[in-house]
Amino acid sequence: MIKVNNLTKAFGPKLAVNDVSFTVERGEILGFLGPNGSGKSTTMRMITGFFPPTKGKITVGGYDVLESPIQIKKLIGYLPENAPAYPDMTVRSFLTFSAQIRGLSGSKLRKAVDRVLELCFLDSVAHQSIDTLSKGYRHRTCFAQSIIHDPDVLILDEPTDGLDPNQKHEVRGIIRRMGEKKVIIFSTHILEEVEEVCSRAIIVDRGRIVADGIPEDLKLRAPGAGSVLLKLRDANVAEVKEKLQQIKTVDSVLVLEDEFTLSLRIKAKYPAPGGDLALSVSQAATDAGWRLEELHTESGRLDEVFRTITQSETAQEKAA
Ligand SMILES: Nc1ncnc2c1ncn2[C@@H]1O[C@H](COP(=O)(O)OP(=O)(O)O)[C@@H](O)[C@H]1O
Ligand SMILES: [Mg+2]
């Protein structure tokens, strides 16, 4: 649905986006993740045709963004950062106006407005003017505007920024529900959001893609991911270590604590999400009759991956 090839945007000497390529298919919810200034908004603006790339090519639904601006705008719903709205219009009149701009009229228009009012939980404030709304409602009004024409593609720039936890939760729910039938790209610097909502994540840093994958796989790149944490009562550390090291898939055994309980981190040779190592460790514990207090596979955290990747990039740059 979306194809981005060798996309570059320069502002003067600065490369805000530097040779970025990716594709997104229908049904994918892509989290576009990166620190402030990493080029997320700039990339999104180019996909929506807000401004042209310095280099590179973008197609959406087979249409070239530069050659078919009208088709592109029909296909895409765009929620910009700090989305604008008309403060003295009511929610319903603003959405009606937005639908008219999109070329809807008559019963189609009414249906479209009713649909987004319901989807974005705005029914109760439909007749209130926008400047009297709380931030969460105002935000969802802008969101409703961006999906009024039921677009196949949604580009959402930090759609949960500035919302309280309940409002964030609601918006994430809306995104997830809509993601079943559409293509969604949304940017965020909140990692838990990506884990909760996205089927795939791209991490960008200083204009470049530094990671691309499903959140589960990316998490395995966290230091310690796939390791097994084991806690035993009344255990002999030497004996336990020896036995664990006999397991074929064990890479190393680190003693974290050896006082009241013996606590160990067991690193796998090949970290995998299945938890095979935990099964082997559990078997060893049963065979040896150890008093087990805790056993679990560490799943890795996206924020650790994020930090590791962006830090190693900085280190490489410094070394160069
Ligand atoms: N219109 C512009 N003119 C000059 N520099 C810009 C412009 N827009 C963005 N930039 C710069 O490009 C970089 C990427 O910005 P942006 O895409 O907004 O990042 P993000 O959305 O990830 O926070 C930043 O360093 C920003 O200062
Ligand atoms: Mg931005």
Image (tube, helix red, strand yellow):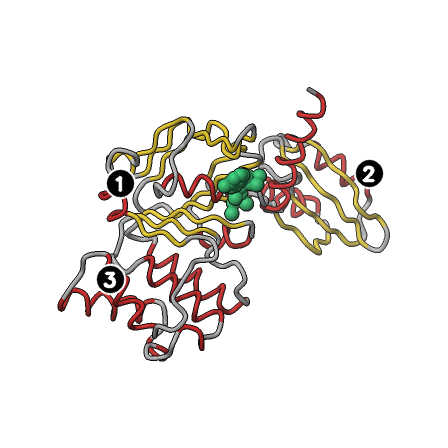
Q: Position of residue 273 (x, y in %)?
A: 52, 42
Question: Residue under circle 3?
Answer: 99
What is the three-letter code of the residue carrying label 2? Ala
User: What residue is drawn where x is 76% and y is 34%?
Assistant: 242
User: What residue is drawn where x is 55% and y is 54%?
Assistant: 192
Q: Quadrant of residue 146?
A: bottom left
Q: CA distance from mark 1 to mark 2?
A: 69 Å
Label 1 or label 2, whichever lies nearer to me, is 1
Q: Is residue 122 left or right of residue 232?
A: left
Q: Quadrant of the C terminus?
A: top right
Q: Nearer the viewer, residue 315 or 9?
A: 9
- From this view, report whether residue 98 is shown above or below residue 154: below
Q: Within 10 angstroms of label 1, few (less than 14), some, or many (20 or more) residues? A: some
Q: Quadrant of residue 64?
A: top left
Q: Establish whether ligand 1 lies closer than 8 Å to the Cβ of label 2.
A: no
Q: Nearer the viewer, residue 68 or 233?
A: 68
What is the three-letter code of the residue carrying label 3? Ala
Q: Element under label 3?
A: helix
Residues at marks 3 and 1 touching, judged by CB atoms closer than 8 Å:
no
Q: CA distance from mark 3 to mark 2?
A: 72 Å
Work out whether mark 3 precedes mark 1 in sequence or the reverse, and give the earlier one: 1
Question: Residue under circle 2?
Answer: 238
Q: What label sits on residue 69 in the rendered view?
A: 1
Q: Quadrant of the N terminus?
A: top left
- Would residue 274 be visible to someone looking at this image? no
